[in-house]
Amino acid sequence: MRIARFAHGTDMSFGVVEGAVGAGAEALTVAEIDSHPFGQLRFTGQRWALADVRLLSPILPSKVVCVGRNYADHAVEMGGDAPAEPLLFLKPSTTVIGPNDAIRLPPQSRQVDHEAELAVVIGPPGARRADRGAAVRAIFGYTCANDVTARDLQRTDGQWTRAKGFDSFCPLGPWIVTGLQASDLEVRCEVGEEVRQLGRTKKMIFDVPTLVSYISHVMTLLPGDVVLTGTPAGVGPLADGDTVTVTIEGIGSLVNGVVSLA
């Protein structure tokens, strides 16, 4: 099932995206659901063509927990070794934007990079000190993410909060897919028509259940929280006027333009 969050006129709602997987927006519809998507879905009877609504970030998390260097090839390109344990950092909720929203390049940075990632959305009841089985049960679904990073600030600061935390630095979307087997999915990033990143989730050093369990022994994961699972090699800079597309097999494509604030 594909769960979207969308705006129609002045109203914002969740809905179920209907139509063939891989079909264009003109062939898809969205059926509005009452309230949030956690629990039994109740449809309102309202339905729109997907092309007639504006997709928003599919969830508004209380926190975004990220995993660094979770692909060996990316660890190498960053000049470091693969970590012995998951390397965690946080993005504030204010970094989250949705499909077609602009990634805003801050004047403080001269190198802002894309990082295509599989994102995990936590469902009820959340996860606290979860073993592997409980971690699997805590997963509501998956979406696409772009862990946008001010690479020069990451190097100079010695820690990653500022480099990862600018507003608009966590695009999510286009929707959440439930019931997806995420152990071997293609992860692709294109800037314009150039393929920059191409990897598979089976190359993760730590798989999704391991990550969710590990994080839950550090902090409680609440329903709606998002876990970014790391990026494959090929990260690179974004420039004013670019269009960056993150595509994950079985989910879809997350497209964002890039604008400079300088």
Image (spheres, helix red, strand yellow):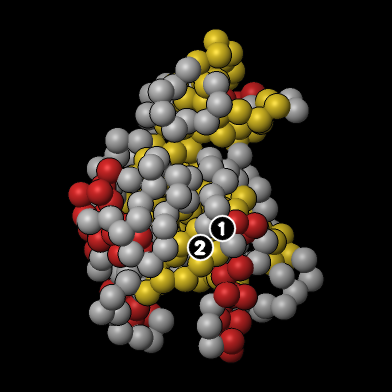
Residue 246 drawn above or below residue 74: above
* Mark 2 vs 1, N-terminal side: 2
Residue 168 visible here: no
Badge 2 local density, few (<14 within 10 Å), some, or many (20+)?
many
Which residue is located at x 39 percent, y 47 percent? 126
Q: What residue type is labelled 1?
A: Cys
Secondary structure beneath disc 1? strand
Extreme residue toward the top, this view: 45
Which residue is located at x 67 percent, y 78 percent? 109
Which of 24 and 55 lies nearest the eye of the viewer? Answer: 55
- The residue singled out by tag 1 in the image is 170
Residue 227 drawn above or below residue 205: above
* Label 2 – label 1 distance at C-alpha: 5 Å
Are the residues at dot 2 and dot 1 in contact (C-beta closer than 8 Å)? yes
Image quarter hosting the N terminus: top left
- The residue singled out by tag 2 in the image is 147
Which residue is located at x 35 percent, y 36 percent? 178
Which residue is located at x 38 percent, y 42 percent? 125
Q: What residue type is labelled 2?
A: Asp
